[in-house]
């Protein structure tokens, strides 16, 4: 059932699809944006932004289906899942005559979304391309960001390797659409080959071992993407500017996760080195690719707990431990909990024991 909430937007009730969430189509000065709102709107806002060719289902479902993490996040936040233009479930192809948005345009869409929902300062969580968009947003609208949770983030212009991969994917999208080879390129971008925490040793599979469930599910969801819409987002990301210098202006606390097998591992290390170490922590996840939210969401739990403690947020007492997480408090530097004017003093940490 569709209901008109204002002259500038349409809210579509899709509770049976989104487990209690509601989709809002927010019309901005740079096109319409799909936002799935999940939780109590009286709570602080957590804004998410996915990676290329993904949406909240294919990029964040693993994290939010992890009971401990879901309890931690939903206890403290109302979730606002923003999809890149044309990446939402059931999206139609964007009109070819519409201008291709730049990364700057995409960040300006986010501020219009925040204003539409009358949100003040928000917590942000992004994966790879989404992490870049939210980092740029945080630099441009510093007063509107409480903190950043970034997964395998980007901050520089594409390396030659990434540029070549993006060029190959652009040509495949343009001439063949969402073909098998393109999906393989995207799965390489998202997932590791081997995982320590999978019942099967091979996440992306091989001739002898079938693909893991998360890769199979992602492959099916990629089939639903409109190739033209993915092509446009890829163009924006491939033309992104280097924001390294701007990182020095960030004063919000930042928690960075990166899989050790991610193609963007060096990018995450570079970004961490440029951020103010008083307010930044790095979590390296073993045997994991870029999309930690799907491949090893339990590795995110304890770092998230300590990070959010600095904002006075906590997990309900019925979940007091996380035996499945590769982190424990003893793995984290005691200095992580030192009081500072902005909350916790964050130090680089790793999941290695």
Image (cartoon, grey):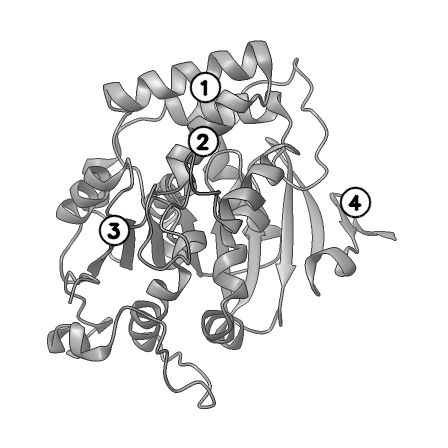
| Closest to the observer, 224 or 51 | 224
N-terminal label among 1 and 2: 1
Q: Residue 295, percent across and down?
A: 41, 53
N-terminal label among 4 and 1: 4
- Rendered residue at 21%/63% (across/down): 351
Q: Secondary structure at mark 3?
A: loop
Quick check: marks 1 and 2 in contact, CB under 8 Å? yes
Please indicate whether residue 89 sits to the left or right of residue 4 in the image: left
- Alpha carbons under labels 3 and 2: distance apart: 30 Å
N-terminal label among 4 and 3: 4
Give the residue at mark 2: 186
- Alpha carbons under labels 3 and 1: distance apart: 33 Å
Q: Secondary structure at mark 1?
A: helix
Mark 1 neighbour class, 10 Å CA radius: few under 14, some 14 to 19, many 20 or more: many
Q: Which mark is residue 169?
A: 1
Toward which corner of the image does residue 202 lie, by quadrant? Answer: top left
N-terminal label among 3 and 2: 2
Mark 2 neighbour class, 10 Å CA radius: few under 14, some 14 to 19, many 20 or more: many
Q: Which mark is residue 7?
A: 4
- Alpha carbons under labels 1 and 2: distance apart: 8 Å
N-terminal label among 4 and 2: 4
Q: Nearer the viewer, mark 3 or mark 1?
A: 1
| Closest to the observer, 201 or 114 | 201
Q: Secondary structure at mark 4?
A: loop
- Alpha carbons under labels 4 and 3: distance apart: 36 Å
Q: Residue 152, percent across and down?
A: 31, 45
């Amino acid at each position: 059932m569709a209901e008109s909430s204002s002259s500038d937007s349409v809210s579509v009730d899709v509770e049976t699809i989104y487990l209690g969430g509601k989709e809002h189509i927010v019309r901005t000065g740079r096109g319409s944006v799909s936002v799935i709102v999940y939780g109590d709107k009286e709570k602080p806002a957590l804004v998410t932004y996915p990676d290329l060719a993904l949406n909240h289902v294919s990029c964040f479902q693993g994290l939010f289906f992890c009971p401990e993490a879901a309890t931690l996040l939903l206890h403290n936040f109302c979730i606002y899942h923003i999809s890149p233009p044309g990446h939402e479930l059931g999206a139609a192809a964007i009109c070819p005559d519409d201008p291709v948005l730049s990364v700057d345009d995409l960040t300006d869409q986010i501020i219009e979304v925040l204003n539409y929902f009358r949100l003040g300062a928000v917590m942000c969580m992004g994966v790879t391309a989404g992490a870049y968009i939210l980092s740029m947003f945080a630099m441009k609208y510093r007063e509107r960001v409480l903190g950043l949770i970034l997964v395998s983030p980007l901050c520089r212009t594409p390396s030659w390797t990434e540029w070549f991969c993006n060029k190959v994917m652009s040509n495949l999208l343009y001439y063949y659409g969402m073909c098998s080879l393109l999906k393989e390129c995207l799965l390489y971008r998202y997932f590791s080959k081997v995982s320590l925490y999978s019942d099967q040793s091979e996440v992306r599979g091989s001739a002898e071992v079938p693909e893991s469930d998360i890769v199979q599910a992602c492959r099916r969801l990629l089939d639903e993407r409109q190739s033209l819409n993915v092509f446009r987002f890829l163009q924006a990301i491939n033309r992104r500017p280097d924001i390294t210098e701007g990182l020095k202006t960030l004063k919000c606390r930042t928690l960075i996760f990166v899989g050790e097998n991610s193609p963007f591992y060096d990018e995450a290390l570079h970004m961490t080195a440029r951020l103010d170490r008083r307010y930044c922590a790095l979590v390296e996840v073993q045997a994991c690719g870029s999309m930690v939210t799907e491949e090893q969401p339990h590795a995110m739990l304890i770092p998230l707990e300590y990070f959010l403690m600095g904002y006075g947020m906590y997990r309900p007492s019925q979940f007091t431990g996380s035996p499945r997480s590769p982190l424990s408090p003893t793995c984290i530097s005691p200095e992580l909990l030192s009081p500072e004017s902005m909350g916790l003093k964050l130090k680089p940490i790793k999941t290695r024991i």
